[in-house]
Amino acid sequence: MSVEVKGLTKLFGIQKAVDDISFAVQPGQVLGFLGPNGAGKSTTMKIATCYLPPSAGTITINGYDVQEAPIEVRRNVGYLPEHNPLYLDMYVTEYLTFIGQLYGLKSKNLKKRVEEMVALCGLTIERRKKIGSLSKGYRQRVGLAQALIHNPQVLILDEPTTGLDPNQLSEIRRLIKQIGQEKTVLFSTHIMQEVSAICDRVVIINKGKIVADSDVASLNTLGQQEISTLVEFESPIEESLLRGIPGVQAIHLVKAYTYRIISQKNSDIRSAVFSLAATHHWSLVGLRQEEHSLEKIFQSLTK
Ligand SMILES: Nc1ncnc2c1ncn2[C@@H]1O[C@H](COP(=O)(O)OP(=O)(O)OP(=O)(O)O)[C@@H](O)[C@H]1O
């Protein structure tokens, strides 16, 4: 496991910012860590990168415990903090060289790594500028480059797309996706769409507790108590037979010969509807599960 969080709790005074959470990120996975403001995302990430000690529980990075082996953890992890602290008076390559030196990179290897990061993060045109003169999107690229300079296996990115315009946003998302092909990425956001655009998996946290842990492919069914299926026929059918399908809870007529069938969570009725239509020679012209908007799902899980 690249990142393993077990029974993690963090107290600030009497406030439980993180309350006994556990999850793991597999090697090569991009995990979206989603939650509203104040949910405990940054706190978890600061513990994973040795900036804060846990009150209870553990985090291991590539098998190294944040409290027992902080130096190894730092070697194995690259971190882009929420507010991306950069030295604004430094030039881009000067800064990356400086960060590389802090990680112990030397001479030829250091120069090569800086060049590689400049190219990977799309900084070639801006490389000779002072960081203070860069746009927010380019500063984020510098932040990503510094997080990657020592070639860590695990990348932890705290809300890397906040405040970007739509063009920069899609560029940074594309870059994170590209980086995610080689690294394990734990990436926080409060935008549900971002998770479906970039991640393989999502963990949703609210008030310090995990409320969902799911594949991105199943995001649309998260937190839903029922499934809604829209079924459209060409001519009249016998509605009572639809009611007999196991799991069906209610049927609403949407318009002539078109029904919205509500069934229990985890009961996909589409193949049963299809078989019924075939048996009775009903002309089935539409059959699809309705998707819930990602905002609604997020709200239902974190309200
Ligand atoms: N150093 C601290 N001292 C006291 N309380 C803190 C400290 N750091 C965080 N908290 C509190 O812990 C809770 C979780 O904060 P955290 O920054 O982890 O949330 P978050 O999910 O990252 O939120 P956001 O999306 O707004 O960045 C908040 O209520 C916050 O006020």
Image (cartoon, rainbow, N blue to C red):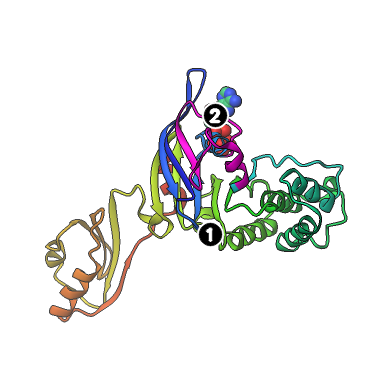
Indicate the position of residue 182 as horizontal and vertical percent values: 57, 61
Residue at disc 1, secondary structure: helix
Q: In this view, does 15 lie to the left or right of 130?
A: left
Magenta span of residues: 49-75
Residue lying at the far top of the rendered structure: 13
Q: Does the segment drawn in magenta span residue 54?
A: yes
Instruction: Tell which of 52 and 19 is nearer to you.
Output: 52
Q: In this view, does 229 lie to the left or right of 280?
A: right
Identified by mark 1, the residue type is: Ala
Residue 53 — which label? 2
Ranked by sequence position, the earlier of labels 1 and 2 is 2
Q: On the rendered image, what quadrant is the C terminus found in?
A: top left
The answer to whether residue 77 is visible is no
Indicate the position of residue 200 as horizontal and vertical percent values: 47, 58
**Exactly how many numbered labels are in the figure?**
2
Cβ of mark 1 under 8 Å from ligand 1: the answer is no
Taking the image as four quarters, which one is ligand 1 found in? top right
Instruction: Tell which of 228 and 141 is nearer to you.
Output: 141
Q: Mark 1 points at which residue?
A: 197
Considering only vertical position in the picture, is 247 above or below 59?
below
Identified by mark 2, the residue type is: Pro
Q: In this view, does 185 lie to the left or right of 287?
A: right
